[in-house]
Image (cartoon, rainbow, N blue to C red):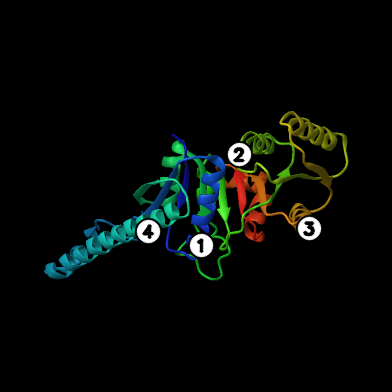
Amino acid sequence: MSYVTACLDTSPFLPAVCDYVAWSCSKLAAPLMLLHVVDSPRYPGSVSLSGTAGLGGREHFLDELVRLDAQRSRVAREQGQILLESAATWLRKAGAPEAQLRLCEGSLPHVVKEQAAGTRLLVIGRQGEDSSEEDYVGSQLESVIRVCDRPILVVPENFSEPESVLLAYDGSDTARKALEWLLEGALCQGMRLHVLLVGNDSEVTRLHLDWARERIAQAGLQANVSARDGLAEHVLQAYIDEHDIDLLVMGAYGHSRIRRFLVGSTTTNMLHRTSLPLLLVR
């Protein structure tokens, strides 16, 4: 069974994540999973004391350290369970399906990767509970995007139901997969569809646009398919402003930082620039 999975924490983005996941479940008619990860390095269940051998007979001090670490870990798990149950109750009242609750320990990217096989869509806030006011993007978000091979909906702090969607299209396999996902799925059904290729007018550009128009026509849909030249981030943002776009869809960068440097710079820049929900497809 493939779930719409929501990554929940206590950041200010929690209400928007819940709103977007309720919207996603309604559109996709998919079951819901709520996921909270207790960060092991932050709340260790056990602590190594191998470096304290030189403290001599201060056994009481060492025992107290162990007790406090165990207590913090237990409290973090209890808080996580309360968070999941509270969110599930709110979502049920909002009309979302009964949620599966999953409380895990470890690092968020590692847990997301482990859960990916059962995920249809991952919904996550742009910032997490550990983000500072200076961070536009959370410290773990890009790592999650790199390891997760499922579509990821990165949401802003406030919810607004999308009515129009823009696919940033470059003719690549990833971009074509993103278009297929939009056409075959129900998430963007009923929304105004725009497909924009950033590049100069050339035979290759026209071939890419013709392929997109043909696939959209085969799906029985209509879309505004066009190309514009210029710096990708600036062209995309200008188009978003002109056409009142509510949701941006892009190909996600690959697994390594090298691949991200080569082909994912536009994705990274838009992740840091746009205030829209951003749907990333690998």
Relative side of 129 to 106, left or right:
right
Type of amino acid under label 2:
Ala
Q: CA distance from mark 1 to mark 2?
A: 25 Å
Residue with the mark numbered 2: 186
Q: Nearer the viewer, residue 101 or 212?
A: 101
User: Looking at the image, is mark 1 or mark 3 earlier in the sequence?
Assistant: 1
Q: CA distance from mark 4 to mark 2?
A: 28 Å
- Few, some or many residues within 10 Å of mark 4 (<14, 14–19, 20+): few
**Badge nearest the viewer, 4 or 3:** 4
**Badge nearest the viewer, 1 or 3:** 1
Q: Residue furthest top?
A: 218
User: Looking at the image, is mark 4 or mark 1 earlier in the sequence?
Assistant: 1
User: Looking at the image, is mark 2 or mark 3 earlier in the sequence?
Assistant: 2
Residue with the mark numbered 4: 86
**Badge nearest the viewer, 4 or 1:** 4
User: Looking at the image, is mark 1 or mark 2 earlier in the sequence?
Assistant: 1
The kind of secondary structure element at disc 3 is helix
Type of amino acid under label 1:
Phe
Disc 1, disc 3: CB below 8 Å? no
Residue with the mark numbered 1: 13
Q: CA distance from mark 4 to mark 3?
A: 40 Å
**Badge nearest the viewer, 1 or 2:** 2
